[in-house]
Amino acid sequence: MAYLHITYYSNALRRMASFEMLIPNDYREMDKPADKPMKTLFLLHGYTGKAGNWVPEDLPGKYNFAIVMPNGENGFYLNGLSTGHDYQRLVGEELVDYVRRTFRLALRPEDTFIAGMSMGGFGALHTALAYPDTFGKLAALSSALIVHGIAKMKPGEDNGMANYAYYRECFGELATAEERDVNPEVLIRRLKAENKKIPDIFMACGTEDFLLENNREMHAFLEKENVPHLYYETPGNHDMVFWNEYIVKAVDWMFG
């Protein structure tokens, strides 16, 4: 298993940046490698996390897929207001293009998937919907689907996770966030109106998770819009125990 740390100049971030990558290009003699073309999973970390802090290392060899792990910092995988904060473009355009040119991977949507947890779950959902011609499937675990909540925040307020200024930097003007394409629901409606294919969707959230209601609301929205998707809700909290269980289920759904 090759584990790569790659440093390059990012136009999206206007500075040197890095990402990590795992490629299952070796195997033990007693193990037969997967006889399938190699696919690619872009794996997004959560709030306060970093690339590589959540790696299902036993799965790529089983299903023969590479993992690309960007450093999304705390940018919610959106194009922020400030110069050098284009995290949506970083994942959805720049890194996909880099991986294609350098490794000849992620060439088609049916070979290119995206997954994440918490902030990364939001990022996986939003990025795949923003780039439906790039990503064929997405898995969003315990997604931080917070647009409706932060839209009501006022300058100077803090919700315990972050303050108004932070959310405004990520999502833009909060009072209009629900109506703009920072809201995954807006992207869904747009894709339907344009008669474009919506990437296959896998969602899961634990019943003890503080983001449960947010995920239930998205599930209900997708049902109302007649968007096919898988939604799982089982005992679990906002933690690695739940994510480690469901990344296995999501990968099996994606690649199995």
Image (spheres, rainbow, N blue to C red):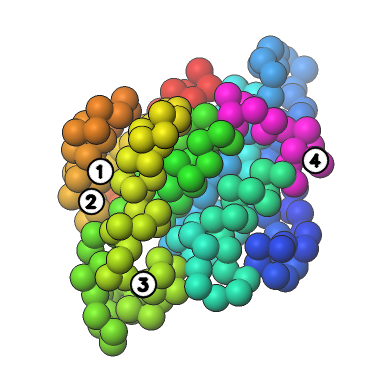
Badge 4 element:
helix
Above or below, 206 relative to 161 = above
Q: Give me the residue at 25% from left, 43% from top.
A: 218
Query: For mark 2, does the 10 Å Cα neighbourhood hold few (<14), some (14 to 19), or many (20 or more) residues?
Result: many
Q: Amino acid at mark 2?
A: Asn
Residue 143 in view in this figure: no
Earlier-in-chain disc, 2 versus 4: 4
Q: Amino acid at mark 1?
A: Met
Q: Are marks 1 and 3 in contact (CB under 8 Å)?
A: no
Which residue has dot 4 on it?
101
Quarter that holds the N terminus: top right
Earlier-in-chain disc, 1 versus 3: 3
Disc nearest the viewer among 3 and 2: 3
Q: The magenta stretch spans which residues?
A: 98-113
Which residue has dot 3 on it?
173
Which residue has dot 2 on it?
214
